[in-house]
Image (tube, grey):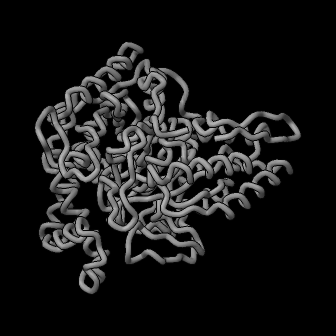
Amino acid sequence: MPTSRCATSRAVITLSDELLTKSAVEVGELIRTREISPVDVTRQLLDHAHALNGEVNAYVSFRDEQALADAERAEKEIAAGDHRGPFHGVPMALKDNLYVAGETTTMASKIHRDFVSADDATVVGRLRDAGIVLTGKLNMHEYAWGIDNNSPHFGAVHNPWDLDKVPGGSSGGSGAAVAADMSFISLGTDTAGSIRIPSSACGLVGLKPTHGRVAKYGCYPLAWTLDHIGPMAKTVDDAAAMLQAIAGFDRRDPTSVDTPVGDYRGALGGDPAGLVIGIEEDYFFANVDAEVERLVRARIDDLVSRGATVRKVSIPALAYSEWTELATSLSEASAIHHRDLQQRPEDFGEDIRFLFYLGELFTSVDYLQAQQARRQIKRDFAAALADVDVLIAPTLPVMAPDIGSAVADLNGSPVDLVDNFIRFTGPSNLTGLPAMTVPAGCNGDLPVGLQIIGKAFDEETVLRVGRYVEESDPMEGRRAPTGA
């Protein structure tokens, strides 16, 4: 990509591809100090995203004219002394199940391909208030119900680390876009792992906040009691800043919780001395790719070498978590889509049509029994977390397979992809506890994620521990080869 010059009243710097590799907070600071123009940055990011989208397929729609107009507005506001925070003027794209008023939101579906909302989603409104520049909407698994992001309606998203591999889902477009420098940061939604799965597979930081921390008004639901919205970012600092921007109560969302918002970026200091890490061996370290386990344990060992301690914990009810997650999510999702499933089943992709039919087989007894199991899982997690600061585990027990594969490799044996991709992430949706994945290193040419699970509404500790892991530079400077 050719370089360009950006004149400002403070300084003049040369824009280069390296700028696109920076974190959102870094770019926001350069914009704040007027060393670069949000208009030039937006134009450069859009040029790069358009050039790569044929390979990666992260975007389903661009809004070039609106984005450049937003960038011009941001530049004038900042010049006038009206600076709104770390994302003012920063271009970014969002998952296409978050409503943008007056614009199409497809949910990567045929049925809602032309849907236009009258309102912004709560998180979209808050990001507008923060001054972001919205560059477009990102691909996803249809109705957010899938983990490989192979869409029959909008095509497969490709993992920027290896274009033949899945990026994870359902927020695969968000993961791929940030990893390929097609968006400085993004948001995902997470019902069984859909923030953390693609963040792990694409080498990003992905945070699922506590259920109720971020309002979901204006986000098309998958399963009401399991859905979350959260950041997908290049750094822990970016994730903390994004949570700061979108967190908070909204009475329009009945699951939103009216509780104080923390100082998430301010919580990132200190060191691991005194940190108590909980390890649950029987579930979270059982049937795991050997190299994934080695990398995660190496990161734990590094924290111990810096003053943390490890305590083994037991969460017996995890034995029921996979059935409980499926009984809950499938039942709720099938209820949401029941009418369309009856009236126009052929308009669903084959994979999710099967799942919605499967969801209608669960009885009310099954659903209520699952909620009883869910309460016990919550109790067991609360007991385990009472004596530790966080739990640490692998994010995914297997590596991302080729696009189109229904199986993954587990130490030489084929295993079901869906079951294994959600096995370690689903419990945090059942409990509603905050959980974050951070890069732990690379297994061959693909990144591996380490998962941190915390206490309810204690995102500060989860983020702080993620920063400790990040400080050890587990990726050793490696980035996705498909990028700027």
Identity of the residue drawn at 35% across and 25% down: 276
Q: Quadrant of the C terminus?
A: top right
In the image: residue 6, left or right of residue 434: right
| Residue 217 shown left or right of residue 319 in the figure | right
Foreground residue among 336 and 233: 233
Relative to the observer, which residue lies in front, 48 or 472?
48
Between 185 and 237, the one lying in front of the other is 185
Q: Looking at the picture, does residue 122 appear above or below residue 39? A: below
- Check the image and report above or below for 100 versus 6: below
What residue sits 23% from the left and 65% below the top? 351
- Farthest residue, direction right: 9
Residue at the far bottom in the pictured view: 343
Is 300 left, or right, of 34 in this rendering? left
How many discs appear?
Answer: 0
Whether residue 26 appears in this view of the structure is: no
Image location of residue 105, percent across then percent down:
49, 70
Q: Residue furthest top?
A: 305
Q: Taking 307 as reference, is 319 above or below it? A: below
Residue at the spot x=40%, y=59% of the render? 140
Q: Position of residue 344 (x, y in %)?
A: 28, 83
* Location of residue 8 in the rendering, given as x and y in whole percent from the top left corner: 85, 41
Q: Residue at x 30, y 24 (%)?
A: 295
Residue 443 quadrant: top left
**Image quarter in which the N terminus is found:** top right
